[in-house]
Amino acid sequence: MDLYEYQGKELLGRYGVPVSAGRLASTPDEARRAAEELGGPVVVKAQVLTGGRGKAGGVKLAGSPGEAAARAEEILGLEIRGHVVRRLWIESAAEIEREYYLAVTLDRGAQRALLMFTTRGGVEIEQVVAESPEALVRVHVDPLEGFEPHHARELLAGVGDERERLQLEAIATGLYRCFVESDATLCEINPLIVTPEAQVRALDAKVTIDDSALFRHSDLAALDDPSAADPLEVRARERGVIYVKLDGSVGIVGNGAGLSMATVDVVVVAGGRPANFCDLGGGGSAAGVVAALEVISSDRQVRSILFNIFGGITRCDEVARGILTALDEISLAVPIVVRLDGTNAEEGRRILAAGGRADLHVEPTMLAAAERAVELAA
């Protein structure tokens, strides 16, 4: 679960991370009142669960309450990467001497928390990695040891000013505590600014909480905003299907997260762009197939659908019947490519062949199926 910036800052503040004063607003009048309360210049910031706000015009400086109201009117209703701005964070403007980047995330390969720091803050971290990978310091922390002073020294070795380094060490410690105690998968501050008075402060905050741990954090679970979720993902969740929206044209259905992710990769190898990640789970029942096709067929970007099924617990004949049942119930305007292997795969292929569907193509291998799906989506 992603938190809005203002929610992330409130959470980080509980762990001693210094943040700028601000107020939430959902109308121009509320923005005006917030600016009056804060006093001085303010920054009007769109609250959306995506990046690129500044480039899209979602972050603007205002020198007075009246100007804050005008900027709020410009930003409210703006669409940023598919997210409509409905709330604003009105924050006291800050003078910036320097910008850093600091984050804690989960390195699943190393099975440890990973802290990252660079003196090149204020830009996308991917850009830093691409242009100057040596500028990004990475430090792993053993969960049984926790974040210790030697981790901080290694992480902040490139900071020459002792006063700044001490503040950064305290912030890194608080950020790590927040990460662990909130069951987060990401706690990121970009930029972490230094003011002309040598005060270090979080100017932005991005926090992602592990959905599986929300039962332990009722206060954080209450922050979830269902209206911000992709409608297709919400619809899939209601039908018990694991679905993640992507930006391509080949719809993907697999059984099991590993196979589904591999199918996404194979579609890319075949020269296509996946439209989604959809996992039927281990069972792959006929009802699950119908639910998956209902969701995927609602995506107007989808121009072909690829089923990649490996029968273990899942029976391929059951999946085949589910596909034909779905085609009877749903009017699909796009072709379907199916690859079946494993338990009752031969029977499943026979069922599909007997169905006599012109827009249903059965392929023997994963790569052949991906290539056909990409070809049909072109």
Image (cartoon, rainbow, N blue to C red):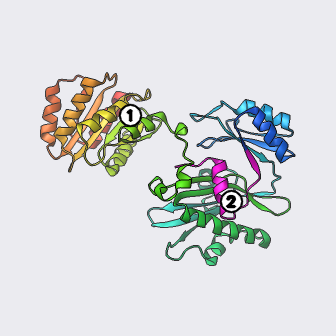
- The alpha-carbon separation of the residues under discs 1 and 2 comes to 43 Å
Q: Secondary structure at mark 2?
A: helix
Q: Residues within 10 Å of mark 2 (few under 14, many from 20)?
A: some
Report the residue marked by disc 2: 13
Which percent across, then down, holds residue 342?
18, 47
Q: Is residue 105 left or right of residue 192?
A: left
Give the mark nearer the N terminus: 1 vs 2: 2
Q: Nearer the viewer, mark 1 or mark 2?
A: 2
What span is colored magenta in the figure?
1-23
Note whether residue 59 is visible: yes
Q: Amino acid at mark 2?
A: Gly
What residue is at 42 percent from the left and 29 percent from the top?
299
Q: Amino acid at mark 1?
A: Val
What residue is at 75 percent from the left and 59 percent from the top?
201
What residue is at 37 percent from the left and 34 percent from the top?
251
Q: Is residue 11 magenta?
A: yes
Which percent across, then down, holds residue 189?
66, 56
- Quarter location, residue 75: top right
Report the residue marked by disc 1: 250
Note whether residue 359 is visible: no
